[in-house]
Image: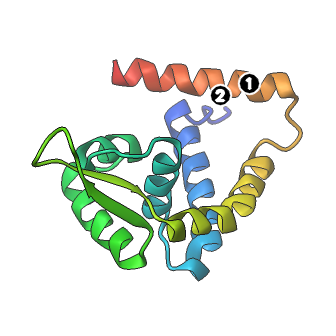
Amino acid sequence: MTAPAPTLLYAVKQVELAVRAQLDELLRPTGCTVPQWTALTVLARREGLTGAELARNAFVSPQAMGDLLAALDRGGWVTRTPDPTHGRRVLIGLSDRGRALLAAVGPGADAVEERMVAGFSDEERAALRAVLNRCRTNLTG
């Protein structure tokens, strides 16, 4: 009798762990962690987020984002600016140093993604992205 195939959940987790290991190795010399890098990549796409908005988009809890932001501040990778439309809110953006970090590690991160989908056609890559986005949408409403 053959063993049952791993579940999709197991397969997704294995891919996540493999990507995480590659990114950990890539980022180690910079002093930046994968969660910090993820937050920086979110800010590269969308400047001026609140801490709560950044937490949602970077896949961490608001409580964890406080510690993460403190580390990003220590690295000099982010800016904090008072929101001109709301006195209590602070908007987070990328500093020049944060942009430089992303530029320095970008090619390595691109190479990790390229290894992950090596041998995939352009159509397969697009289909994988679409299916993964549908999975996320199904789980997040």
Against 124, residue 43 (above or below) is: below
Using the image as rendered, state which of residue 41 and residue 97 is in the foreground.
Answer: 97
> Which residue is painted at 46% across and 49% down in the image?
43
Per the rendering, the mark at residue 116 is: none
Expressed as whole percent of the image width and height from the top left, the position of residue 53 reads 29, 41
What residue did someone put label 2 on? Answer: 129
Image quarter where the N terminus lies is: top right
> Which residue is painted at 32% across and 41% down in the image?
56
Expressed as whole percent of the image width and height from the top left, the position of residue 14 reads 58, 48
> Which residue is painted at 73% across and 63% down in the image?
108
Locate residue 140 relative to residue 94 in the image: left or right: left
Dot 1, how many residues are within 10 Å of its Cα: few (below 14), some (14-19), or many (20+)? few
Describe the element under mark 2 as helix, strand or loop. Answer: helix
Q: Which amino acid does label 2 sit on?
A: Arg
Describe the element under mark 1 as helix, strand or loop. Answer: helix
Q: Which amino acid does label 1 sit on?
A: Ala
Expressed as whole percent of the image width and height from the top left, the position of residue 120 reads 85, 34
Using the image as rendered, state which of residue 136 and residue 67 is in the foreground.
Answer: 67
What residue did someone put label 1 on? Answer: 126
Expressed as whole percent of the image width and height from the top left, the position of residue 67 reads 25, 67
Mark 2 vs 1: CB contact within 8 A:
yes
Image quarter where the C terminus lies is: top left
Locate residue 127 relative to residue 30 in the image: left or right: right
User: How many numbered discs sit on the rendered protein?
Assistant: 2
Dot 2, how many residues are within 10 Å of its Cα: few (below 14), some (14-19), or many (20+)? few
